[in-house]
Amino acid sequence: MRRLIKTVMLMLFAAVMLPALSCEKKGGGDDQKPGKPDVDNVVPPEPQEREDITEETDYKTLTWVAADITFETESAYEKNTQLYVEFYGDFTNRETKTKLTIPGFWNGENTFVLRFAPTEYGIWDFTTRCDTDRSLNGKKGTVAANQYKGDLEIYKRGFVTTNGSKHFVYADGTPFFYLGDTHWGMYTEEINRGGAHAGDTGAGSHFKYIVDKRAEQGFTVYQSEPIGTGADLTDGTLSAGDVRAFIRNDEYYKYIAEKGLVHANAEFFFAGQMNEKVMNDKSYMEAISRYWVARYAAYPVMWTLAQEIDSSFYASRGDQKLYTAANNPWVLIAEYIHKYDAYSHPLSGHQENASFTTVTGLGTTEKGTNDGKSVFLSDEVSARTGHNWWAVQWSPSLTGSVNTDVVKDYWQSSKVAINYEGRYCYLWTKNFGARAQSWISMLSGFSGVGYGAIDMWLYNSNYDVNSTSSDGIDKITPEDKAVHWSEAVEFESAYQHGYMRSFFEQFKWWELTPDFDSRTFFIPDSSEPLNVSAAIPGDLYIVYFYSRGNASGSVAGLYPGETYEAKWFNPRTNEYTDIGTFVAPGKDAAGNSVWKAPDRPAFTDGTDKVKDVVLLVKRIEAD
């Protein structure tokens, strides 16, 4: 039976309020005197330090840090049947009585493992259960979970969850900023050597070098697909050879966790490898789901199922003919993962391109077998599978206005929405486009973004590298696409995503409401410069411009008589330019207090390229 993390912990999250699902006019439209500005992000204090446990226990670890507890079976199993051994550990915190039921996994030969990450400080008592193997049943032990006292937020604050909010939070309720880096071929990235594409990096490990660099640049999530795992799970069995591959792959998960990143991982195999044998064997799908959870749920992870399986891995255009949205096997796999995951990690299904699938089909242009609707749309399916966030695939136009039908569809959903996959840098866009699509996403209601770069999104790939692509602004030639990861890891847009995260984390970014096309918060000049904006009405306004020229517009919905400061932010250099302070004027004939922003600064390098810029307006207390 599935065990939830302590009820009291969940109650703490209830204080996180959902943003309004509309652009209802607030701020200067209200007549009451506003309170003090309250938009700055004040990080909650860290928990009070606890002394290390001195009582002797069988095992020791730290809160939220995985520990392996190994057992040897005395039973002789027929070949490849160990997958179906249902082996569990019931862990109970001696002080709080919190209970977690953790599935165990076969780790080759006669070894079974319980991989356990304690969610609370204290001594945890455990008892094993296995109805089919007496040698694994009824084993007792203790685990001392000392308080984590390092610098990594994921262990100080606990695993990431949603708790019904429109943004991710740590276990203690602190908002979590999702900034993901894409590695669909992660398992093919050399872990014990630099590899042929390491260039002058001096990397002793291709994989670890990139993880270290991304953590340094400010990324918080690693996004992977099970391509090149070395384990063949498409044949309906788990062999000893498959387990050896899993043991090797554990090193990837472990290192990502050691660096404090969350691993948004897909399960089993590439979506196109789903076959009739696996699909029709529910006992195997459940067993392999339990196995995957048993191996990896004790790390900071999110589940994304498989590549573009929501709604049906493009069954409508013939990419696969095995299933449609109506009998999608990944929905059942989601149910099994949810059933066995004691930590309630966030679960999604990587979506098809937004032209095919959104939430309700709003904004799609290629109606498929499910009329553009997600297979996880209904409340019943969401509850049964634990689906609680959208892994969106959306590439906004860089030369036109935002398709507000698409973004509104996600904003109106109660679930977290992440623009999980867009154009990859130096495959289908360059630095401007990679940067712009993320700013556009963040100010259109998404609560995080994924990023990807050539030779990293899919290592050593030949996919679409021999043709010239265009994002409407830049052309990306085959020569551009020949860049190796050793150069791509240093793309300026990777650093600029870190700048973007720092910019938003100054504020209560999760309280921002998008303007969409309502012009409630920002009214562009008559020349209609391309822009996207969001606000905490009356208190904070953020406008991102991404077109040529220096036209701007007017900020609306201010509190008359209140003092504001205005700045330009350069998203390429992480630099601010003061515009100055102003007092919001009285209401105009339409009942609105409006301030005209100055023309955008050039921020130019002497070329005719688009130079994006951010307008920041914030209410402050007058001297």
Image (cartoon, helix red, strand yellow):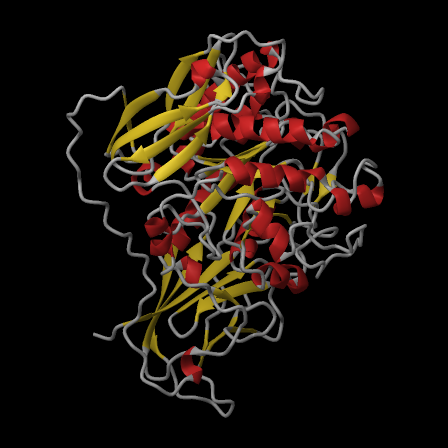
Where is residue 151 shown, x and y percent of the image?
28, 35
Q: Is residue 611 visible?
A: no
In-front residue for pair 462/174:
174
Q: Tell me how many marks there are.
A: 0
Indicate the quadrant where residue 41 lies.
bottom left
| Up-down relation of residue 203 to residue 406 (above or below) | above
Residue sitting farthest toward the bottom? 589
Residues 433 and 21: in front is: 21
Which percent across, then down, holds residue 243? 56, 14
The residue at the point 61 percent across, 15 percent down is: 81
Horizontally, is 534 left or right of 159 in the view? right
Vertical comparison of 97 with 485: above or below: below
Left or right, residue 551 beside residue 585: right
Residue 215 lies in what quarter of the image?
A: top left
Please tell me whether residue 63 is drawn above or below residue 254 in the rendered image: below
The x and y percentages for residue 396 are: 65, 53
Q: At 33% from the left edge and 55% from the top edge, which residue is drawn?
A: 12
Image coords of residue 337 (percent x, y): 56, 36
The residue closer to the viewer here, 201 or 176, is 176
Q: Vertical placement of 246 versus 351: above or below?
A: above
Relative to residue 265, is residue 482 drawn left or right? right
Task: Give the position of the C terminus as an image quadrant.
Answer: bottom left
Displayed quadrant of residue 440: bottom right
- The residue depicted at 61 percent of the width and 75 percent of the height is 526
| Whether residue 323 is visible | yes
